Amino acid sequence: MNEALDFKDIHGNKIDPIDHTRKILAENPFVSIHIGTDSQSIAKQTRYITVIAYRFGNRGVHYILKKSGVPQIKDLWTRLWKETEMSIDVAESIKKRLDIKAEIDMDYNEDENFKSNKLVNATRGWANSLGYKVNIKPHGQIATRAADYHCK
């Protein structure tokens, strides 16, 4: 399995995200798929959590996740840019293998009072140029909310 697609369920069981997504779509063709990454620097490491979330309309959300870590990234721009890279990498893998486009949730804020706002135009522009719908705070954060929960 591709390392970028090394996902697990919330119980720690390995899940192939391509097969898992294919199965969910076969059973629920109208599910919306959201991909998002969050990060947190703890001690000497920056931890990244990437989530693929499957939203079943008003009937709830199911998700799988990938945890990874790198030596601590102190520069905020670099750390947050990597979140977008990781989400787009997963979205592109799914798009190529299943011919579907997920929505990308970004843990950045449209409010200019937040430091993450400086990345909104560049990251959203990149994802939009690849054909993805992007959700940014305060709108529709599904995958990044789950990623945030597992980052702490």
Image (tube, helix red, strand yellow):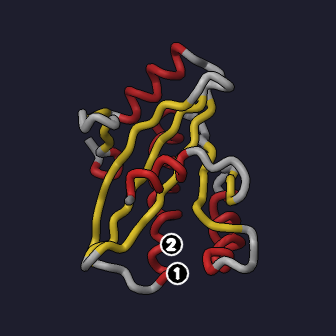
Quarter of the image for residue 71 reads bottom left
At horizontal 47% and vertical 79% (from top left) the residue drawn is 78
Q: Residue at x 73, y 52 (%)?
A: 139
Image spot of residue 63 (x, y percent)? 45, 36
Residue 59 in percent (x, y) is at 62, 22
Residue occupying image coordinates x 28% and y 71%: 70
Tell me the element at label 2. helix
Quarter of the image for the N terminus: give it.
Answer: top left
Q: Say if mark 1 contacts mark 2, CB within 8 Å.
A: yes
Where is mark 2, residue-wise? 80
Toward the bottom, the furthest residue is 75
Residue 42 vertical position relative to residue 90 in the rendered view, above or below: below
The relative height of residue 47 versus residue 141 in the rendered view (above or below) is: below
Q: Amino acid at mark 1?
A: Trp
**For this rendering, which residue is in front, 13 or 101?**
13
Q: Nearer the viewer, residue 33 or 142?
A: 142
- The residues tagged by marks 1 and 2 sit, at their Cα atoms, a distance apart of 5 Å
Crowding at dot 2, Cα within 10 Å, few <14 / some 14-19 / many 20+, comes out as many
Numbered tag placed on residue 131 in the rendering: none
**Image quadrant occupied by the C terminus:** bottom left
Q: Amino acid at mark 2?
A: Leu
Q: How many marks?
A: 2
The circle drawn on residue 77 is 1
Choose top left, top right, bottom left or bottom right for residue 11. top left
In the displayed structure, 25 sits above or below 129; it is above
Can you give x and y, in whole percent of width and height, for residue 30 in the image? 65, 22
How crowded is the residue under tag 1: few (<14 C-alpha within 10 Å), some, or many (20+)? few
Q: Give coordinates of residue 17: x percent, y percent.
A: 38, 35
Residue depicted at 69% across the width and 47% down the height:
140
In screen coordinates, is 110 left or right of 16? right
Q: Name the secondary structure under disc 1.
A: helix
